[in-house]
């Protein structure tokens, strides 16, 4: 077995999550070949003796991937003192023993039914439940009465909830065969209710129940019938089954939405590039909020790799040493489902990656073709399910040259420096202000002259200028450009994968 990071080896052996394993290492509880271990140390667990509290760990516990048809009244937490029954308890003892620690992927409310996944593979579970992965979930929604046209329109255009604008990807009448199939898959059978099929890409707490309640029609029954490519079909209530390798792999790749269930416009893939401190994150996230799009700030990936390298003392010129850090970095969603946070080995380091030290070194790291290549599939995966604004430096030119719309945010370097200085309560003509201006000029220079993926305006980009405009004005301008593009290219879905 090749060498892996110690915390990964511990997690794979089912000892603890990577994060908890790190804590065990720091606490001095872990040894490798009898010597105290360090976080990040590379080990070959088959040939080296890795021990926790003096007891040698086994080699890799087999990963298990389970689908479960959850009945009403069962909670999807691992341990809930108040819960009478949890999903984990529905798993046969033998499977539970084999799995070590088993946990549900995402949630399904106590009073909801249907498909839920369980695994002991933390990385797979985390990726799949991340909004960044854009895995769609489809629900059979049972209502006491049919929806009116205005109610349907309200649900499709979006309902304001505390987290932001809640939208469904699609909403349609359920067909008779679909509803008949619910018999057996659920305890109660579908009788007496009007059934709809709703697809969701966002995943806020009790989102569908709150959305339907907001338009005045409470949900009577909620059955999850699909997660990405995996359907509930053929399962009966309470059943647990192992996924086939093909099912697991298909799910692990971002699941393309099922064209048959989509009746709304698919939403565009929008690239947003521009120089440092041009406000791409604030403007892009604002536009995404108003459009019900996802938003992703790719600069965080480069920042996190840089921060991690500085933290672990990795030489910033050592491309190979930097590339191995990439798998530890994950973008995470904020409360609105926008990918504006970054996690390293499960820890939120968004604040840390914005510090001055990272500012000074990140362009050096971002110049390295190896680092860029390692981050490329990550970014494409995130964009794959569409309806996203992805911000960075080379999104339109390299990461998503085929995006539906390329945007460029234009702001003079003086204006950018003025804004940065103002954020810190400084004037541009102060010595510190001058330093900020010089630093931005230097970063522009490095970003635009590097040989791999230099910063440049995509050929067909729509240019949005923010000089002299307030943030909200620029957001409005961007929303208008995207709406115009939607009506050009965002024709009703014709079955083309997102
Ligand atoms: O947007 P930002 O300042 O957070 O970006 C941080 C650094 O990462 C910056 O030096 C440019 C680099 N970057 C890049 O090269 N390509 C991207 N897609 C995003 C950021």
Image: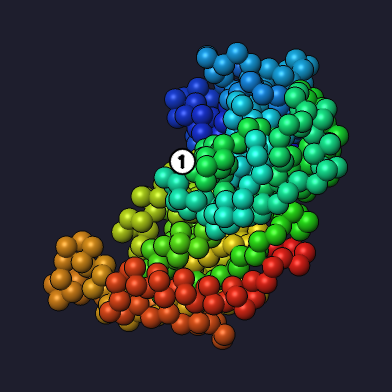
Residue 414, located in which quarter of the rendered image? Answer: bottom left
Q: Which of 228 and 14 is in front in this view?
A: 228
Vertical placement of 325 versus 194: above or below? below
Residue displayed at 77% across by 17% down: 92
Locate the N terminus and report the quarter of the image it occupies.
top right
The colour scheme applied to this rendered structure is rainbow
Q: Does residue 114 appear to the left or right of 416 in the view shown?
A: right
Residue 84, located in which quarter of the rendered image? Answer: top right
Residue 471 drawn at (x, y percent): 33, 69
Residue displayed at 69% across by 68% down: 492
Locate the C terminus and report the quarter of the image it occupies.
bottom right
Q: Nearer the viewer, residue 98 or 363?
A: 98
Element marked by disc 1: strand
Q: Nearer the viewer, residue 217 or 138?
A: 217
Vertical placement of 143 versus 171: above or below? above
Residue 29 drawn at (x, y percent): 50, 22
Residue 40 drawn at (x, y percent): 53, 40
Classify mark 1: residues with Cα within 10 Å, few (<14), some (14-19) or many (20+): few
Vertical placement of 386 versus 208: above or below? below
What is the residue that sits farthest to the bottom in this orientation?
459
Q: Does residue 412 appear to the left or right of 483 in the view shown?
A: left
- Residue 342 in sight here: no
- Residue 428 in sight here: yes
Residue displayed at 57% across by 16% down: 83
Residue 118 drawn at (x, y percent): 69, 31
Q: Return the residue at label 1.
A: 347
Q: Does residue 173 appear to the left or right of 297 in the view shown?
A: right
């Amino acid at each position: 077995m090749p060498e892996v990071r110690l915390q990964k080896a511990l997690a794979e052996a089912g000892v603890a999550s990577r994060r908890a394993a790190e804590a065990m290492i720091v606490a001095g509880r872990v040894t490798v070949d009898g010597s105290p271990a360090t976080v990040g140390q590379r080990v070959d667990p088959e040939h080296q003796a890795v021990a926790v509290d003096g007891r040698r760990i086994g080699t890799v516990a087999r990963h298990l991937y389970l689908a479960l048809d959850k009945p009403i009244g069962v909670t999807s937490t691992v341990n809930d003192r108040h819960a009478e029954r949890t999903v984990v308890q529905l798993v046969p003892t033998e499977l539970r023993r084999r799995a070590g620690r088993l946990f549900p992927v995402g949630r399904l409310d106590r009073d909801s039914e249907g498909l839920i996944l369980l695994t002991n593979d933390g990385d797979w579970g985390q990726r799949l439940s991340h909004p960044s992965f854009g895995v769609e979930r489809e629900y059979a929604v049972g209502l006491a009465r049919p929806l009116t046209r205005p109610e349907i329109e309200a649900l499709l255009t979006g309902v304001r909830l505390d987290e932001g604008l809640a939208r469904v990807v699609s909403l349609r009448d359920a067909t008779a065969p679909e509803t008949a199939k619910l018999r057996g898959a659920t305890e109660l059978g579908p009788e007496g209710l009007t059934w709809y099929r709703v697809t969701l890409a966002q995943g806020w707490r009790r989102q569908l129940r709150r959305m339907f309640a907001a338009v005045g029609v409470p949900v009577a029954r909620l059955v999850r019938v699909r997660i990405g490519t995996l359907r509930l079909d053929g399962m009966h209530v309470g059943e647990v089954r192992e996924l086939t390798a093909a099912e697991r792999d298909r799910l692990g790749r971002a699941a393309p939405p099922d064209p048959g269930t989509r009746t709304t416009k698919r939403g565009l893939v929008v690239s947003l590039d521009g120089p440092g401190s041009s406000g791409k994150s604030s403007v892009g996230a604002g536009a995404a909020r108003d459009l019900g799009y996802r938003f992703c700030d790719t600069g965080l990936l480069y920042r996190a790799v840089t921060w991690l390298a500085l933290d672990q003392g990795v030489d910033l010129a050592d491309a190979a040493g930097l590339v191995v850090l990439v798998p530890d970095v994950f973008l995470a969603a904020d409360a609105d489902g926008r990918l504006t946070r970054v996690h390293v080995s499960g820890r939120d380091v968004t604040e840390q990656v914005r510090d001055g030290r990272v500012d000074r070194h990140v362009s050096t790291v971002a110049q390295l073709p190896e680092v860029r290549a390692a981050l490329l599939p990550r970014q494409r995966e995130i964009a794959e399910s569409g309806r996203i604004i992805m911000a960075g430096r080379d999104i339109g030119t390299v990461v998503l040259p085929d995006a539906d719309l390329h945007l460029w945010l234009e702001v003079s370097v003086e204006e950018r420096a003025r804004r940065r200085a103002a954020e810190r309560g400084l004037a541009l003509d102060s010595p510190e202000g001058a330093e900020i201006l010089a630093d931005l000029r230097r970063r522009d220079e490095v970003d635009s002259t590097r040989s791999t993926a230099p910063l440049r305006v995509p050929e067909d980009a729509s240019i949005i200028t923010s000089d002299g405009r307030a943030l909200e004005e620029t957001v409005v301008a961007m929303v208008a450009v995207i709406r115009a593009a939607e009506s050009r290219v965002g024709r009703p879905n014709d079955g083309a994968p997102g």
